[in-house]
Image (tube, rainbow, N blue to C red):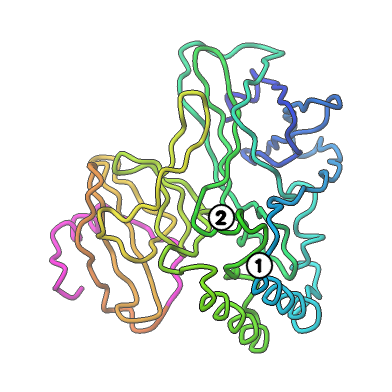
Amino acid sequence: MDALSSTSLSTLSQHPKSLLSFNNNNYYYYSPNTSSSFTLKVFSIGGEEPIPSPPKRQPISSRKPSFPSNIFNTFDDFVNTYIDPPRKSCVDPKYVLSNNFAPVDELPPTECKVVEGSLPSCLDGAYIRNGPNPQNLPRGPYHLFDGDGMLHSIKISQGKDTFCSRFVKTYKYNIENETGFQIIPNVFSDFNGLLPSVTRGAITLARLIAGQFNPANGIGLANTSLALFGGKLFALGESDLPYAVKIALDGDIITLSRHNFNGKLVKSMTAHPKIDPETNEAFAYRYGPFPPFLTYFRVDPNGIKTADVPIFSIKRPTLFHDIANHKKIRDIFRHTNRNEPD
């Protein structure tokens, strides 16, 4: 991405303003150029210009909610208004989702016009990033980690660059895109405190009984990271299985499937797997509330997942954000039988 900063000032059509990247003290963002186009500007932190608020998003679905949905939504609104309103600005969507963090819409593949410099013809590849972006504006408290996964990519080939933004088409995204409102609760913002947890849990259970969603199909957002291993590119989030995605020849971003490695991965996995640079194996883990609280596994270069190795030294539920992965540790797990304690 840094290589692009000196060669490409790009004009994109009909796309809301959004933060594209933050690397090495440089911001990349869209600002209005004319009434029908947007320009990619690059500048240092010290020279930041004010960014106007984005336009209001249009409702995603015009489908009329069913009677049960209206009842559940009414209870949701009651909880969000009287039991657990966003009292602090750090969880108030009006503040959290503003300026650079404001939600943006999808953008189909759009060729960027190079107005200064040139792109080397030998460059052939893509820069892609993942991050949270709520498709439905939240009605109650909101945490930045609770947005739907959206992928932004710049595909470069034959001296041309194509920009595209697409949501990861998770199960949660698809059913809430169809209805136009939130069905599956957010992990970080919906369960803070006993009373909010009980009331929102009861509404979620009622939606489940009414058949509005099936948790067996996944509840994750795939909004945390991207990893290339086993011959596939995955959008990852720790609350679900990985989602396989790809960049098409025209620069479009396509969600392929919720991936379970031929049935060998039945629960969620870390969003930060480690790739062995010598063997191209991926080493990953998952944690949970029931024993074994931590399991470790690897995926070979052909995408075949090996058996889980339980880590019995972890005696209670623990949240693991990331791990260090030394060569000696990788060698131990390559030769550890799944039935042997650590």
Numbered range of the magenta stretch:
318-342
Q: Is residue 211 left or right of residue 328?
A: right
Rendering quarter of residue 78: bottom right
Question: Which of the two discs, 1 and 2, sits closer to the camera?
Answer: 1
Mark pair 1, 2: CA separation: 19 Å
Q: In this view, does 97 lie above or below 279?
A: below
Q: Is residue 279 above or below residue 249?
A: below
Q: Position of residue 306 (x, y in %)?
A: 20, 57
Q: Is residue 89 left or right of residue 135?
A: right
Per the rendering, the mark at residue 66 is 1
Residue position marked by numbered label 2 in the rendering: 173
| Neighbourhood count class around disc 2 (C-alpha, 10 Å): few under 14, some 14–19, many 20 upward | many
User: Which quadrant: the N terminus?
Assistant: top right
Of 46 and 77, nearer the camera is: 77
| Neighbourhood count class around disc 1 (C-alpha, 10 Å): few under 14, some 14–19, many 20 upward | few
User: Which quadrant: the C terminus?
Assistant: bottom left
**Residue for point 51% across, 78% down:** 209
Q: Position of residue 331 (x, y in %)?
A: 19, 55
**Residue for point 62% across, 21% down:** 111
What kind of residue is marked 1? Ser
**Residue for point 58% across, 82% down:** 201
Secondary structure mostly seen in magenta is loop
